[in-house]
Amino acid sequence: MKYDLHLHTTASDGRLKPAELVKMAVDRGLEVMAVTDHDSIGGIDEALSAAGKFPKIYVIPGVEINTDLASGELHVLGYFLDYNDHDLAASLEKIRESRVGRAQKMIEKLRKLGKPVEWQRIQELARGESVCRPHIAQAMLEKGYVNSEREAFDKFIGRNGPAYVEREKIKPVEAVEIIKHARGIPVLAHPADIENLDDMIVELKAAGLVGLEAYYAQYHKPVIEKLVKMAQKYGLLTTGGTDYHHFQDGGEIALGSADIPKESIEKLFGAAGRHIDLS
Ligand SMILES: [Zn+2]
Ligand SMILES: [Zn+2]
């Protein structure tokens, strides 16, 4: 396995700094990786400069934008973004601000439930980047309210939990448009559980969707095969990755262990007007 196109850093809810993530990818022998933080491109500069020290790894600047459906969330990945684009920075900043408001409301709910956590601590854990629910879970664990971050989700901040608050809603089409505007390649992330997937693909393709994340490391073979067929049906390219966060909770799939065909990587580069010589 030499490629991983879905990775998180401390710029969102990942636990490794971008340079540490690149180092781990190099140590695991990866040729191509993408940094795809939630609603943030804050890790890209550091990842690219870290990659400069290693001749054999290519780092694709990316993002994962969280959007909302009536039935849950839908995530859109963006690759080869012009990450210096001012409109992109402004759009992501706006989305991150909605995360701050949401986190503060969740903290208020937790306080009323007798489980106060400090906003300052959440901000420290988020390190000035996207504030995510795992940061709240971490703070709750530190306080001893729960025995694991998973328990914080199960009992308090998960979708049906008493301290859950929805984010300001963003439509999937808007995420595709934000990525297109920054000359990136929009790809539908971990699509297997999306309701009415065909309809969603048709709608997003009209807005500029280019790919489907069929080779998601958590999917079993039949699911991957179904998604690859779907990609063919709609003329989309395929990508894949592990969604690695370095959570170290025992349940996480190792970085670089998604089985992505070489042709998928070449097609993604081709769609971005680039060429890569893979071994
Ligand atoms: Zn996701
Ligand atoms: Zn992800």
Image (cartoon, rainbow, N blue to C red):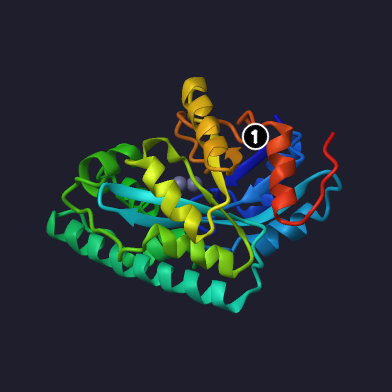
Up-down: is 113 above or below 31? below
Query: Could one spot residue 124 in this view of the protein?
Result: no
Up-down: is 84 above or below 41? below
Position of residue 154 measured from the top left corner of the image (x, y, whole percent) = 25, 39
Residue that appears at 76% across and 34% down: 29
What is the total number of numbered labels drawn onto the structure image?
A: 1
Position of residue 169 measured from the top left corner of the image (x, y, whole percent) = 31, 63
Mark 1 surroundings within 10 Å by alpha-carbon count, few (fewer than 14), some (14 through 19), many (20 or more): many
Residue that appears at 42% across and 56% down: 66
Observer-nearest of 59 and 27: 59
Position of residue 205 measured from the top left corner of the image (x, y, whole percent) = 50, 53
Residue that appears at 58% across and 43% down: 235
Q: Quadrant of the N terminus?
A: top right
Q: Which residue is mark 1?
A: 256
Observer-nearest of 265 and 27: 265
Observer-nearest of 40 and 245: 40
Left or right: residue 126 compared with residue 269:
left
Label 1 beta carbon within 8 A of ligand 2: no
Position of residue 182 measured from the top left corner of the image (x, y, whole percent) = 61, 68
Query: Could one spot residue 185 in this view of the protein?
Result: yes
Up-down: is 57 above or below 129? above
Q: Quadrant of the C terminus?
A: top right
Which amino acid, by three-letter code, is at mark 1?
Gly
Left or right: residue 233 compared with residue 21:
left
Dot 1 lies on which element?
loop
Observer-nearest of 237 and 130: 237
